[in-house]
Amino acid sequence: MTRAPCRPCNPRQLSLARRLFPVYPVYMTSVHSISLGCPKNRVDTEHCLGLLQALLETAGDSLRLVDAPEKAALVLINTCSFIAPAVQESVRTLLECIDRIQQLPEAERPLLAVAGCLVGRYGQKTLAPDLPEVDLFLPGAELAAWPLLLHAALRRKAARSGASPAALPARYPLEAPAYPGPLRLLSTGPSYAWLKISEGCRHSCSFCAIPAIRGPLRSVPADLLLQEAKLLLQQTRELILVAQDLTAWGADLGLKHGLISLLERLLPLPGLDRLRLMYLYPAGLSTELLRFLQQAGPPFVPYFDVPLQHASPPLLVRMGRPFAKEPERIVGRIRSFFPEAALRTSIITGFPGENEEDFELLLNFVQQSRFHHLGVFTYHAEEGTEAASMPGHVPEKKKVLRKERLLALQKEISAAILEQYQGRRMELLVDAAHAEWPGLHVARTWFQAPEVDGVTYVSGPGVVPGTLVTAEITESSDYDLVALTDA
């Protein structure tokens, strides 16, 4: 969580915190936070830190983020376990952090809390025997309680050291709210923020462990999302809606066109310059939704992140995808409403049963579809999923070679698409100053999402993080652009 300096809660946030939480003085407040995996995890971490900060500020204290575990009173690691490499990264990050902490004298070691999907997938009983150094395990199912549990654990640790007030509550006199609330400690700078609109998933794709880890679909009520969005727009200009499947929002609330009704309330918000939708389940891209988005216009940007996973009908059936015979129709439907739309998708190579014919069909599909952005992943057999026990597993070397062929093709497509923008004047949202080149900034066009796509490097007068500038595209590469504002 070191992407950008975090700002203190504003008065409205503090007022809300005082209504939600009791006020107790707290001793230790320096925090080192690591958030792994997807933006949804980042939002969870920001919620947790925002609520913890509010607890501290109501007591006249403050939360101070530090850049190393050795400097912290609390180390919070929010883990990912979506696929095997994510599990490996989470474990590696955790063990590296433990090694650094163990170099400190015992009295100076921070409280170590491990949160999120790794805990949700394997459970404390499985993890604790191998990780005795971890003080607190926080599963995703208890997300709203994380700040309370951390706050209480910090107080207990301070009490044992004799450094905190003597009068300590045995436990908090209220239950955590069902939803974390709108409080956030943003780590993404002044240009954009993620808005997670639901938790869990209602689908049953044969390769995916998310429903087992995160549970069933649980939509965040619209009133709470609106409140959170308004607070975010006091600090940022672009909202990016994320969920396991955006198009499913409201289905568990009995809403037929839930996402449309939510967007009707979000799009008119003051200060919203861009609204981006990430992870639109293909089967949910109905004519009604596309027509609504077409008529809505700005601040909606015609950027569609649609995880197709493959193009071969037999494989899509085995994957449990409900649009098994029509991936081309999904792409065609979007472009019938938005001819110039930027499309992003993700592809899995080496799914059980994938043969050369399936892969050639996939290559042709990618060639014809001309995606702006393409993510490619090799298949991993995840424990507990239906696909893990399917016959026809593809050798690892072949999976990787297929991935490399797809990425090589996409590199050519991306370079050709970006070359078409040379000489155009475009509006750019400036994210941050370049870390190494003074005067150069990292920005994004409407068709570049943060953290997953290429960027536009821009320089010239008026370029400041968090601002929209108009600049001429002067160069293009395989994935990035270079631009210059007017003198």
Image (tube, rainbow, N blue to C red):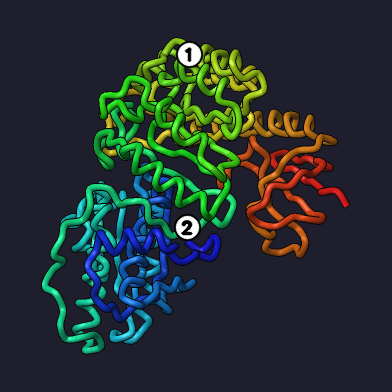
Q: Front-most of 242 and 83?
A: 242
- Give x and y (percent) for residue 424: 81, 35
Amino acid on which disc 1 is placed: Thr
- Give x and y (percent) for residue 21: 24, 63
- Give x and y (percent) for residue 51: 33, 61
**Which residue is tagged 2?**
186
Amino acid on which disc 2 is placed: Leu
Q: Residue at x 37, y 81 (%)?
A: 103
Q: Residue at x 16, y 79 (%)?
A: 168
Would you say 371 lies left or right of 267 here? right
Residue extending farthest to the left is: 170
Q: How many marks?
A: 2
Q: Quadrant of residue 147?
A: bottom left
Can residue 341 be seen in this snapshot? yes
SS at badge 1: helix
**Which residue is tagged 1?**
287
Label pair 2/1, CB-CB below 8 angstroms: no
SS at badge 2: loop
* Crowd class of label 1 (few under 14; some 14 to 19; many from 20; radius 10 Å): few
Q: Which mark is residue 134?
A: none
Work out whether 289 lies above or below 33: above
* Crowd class of label 2 (few under 14; some 14 to 19; many from 20; radius 10 Å): many
Would you say 268 lies left or right of 441 here? left
Badge 2 or badge 1: first in the primary sequence: 2
Q: Front-most of 90 and 380?
A: 90
Q: CA distance from mark 2 to mark 1?
A: 35 Å
Q: Residue at x 47, y 46 (%)?
A: 194
Q: Front-most of 440 and 355?
A: 440
Can residue 100 be seen in this snapshot? no
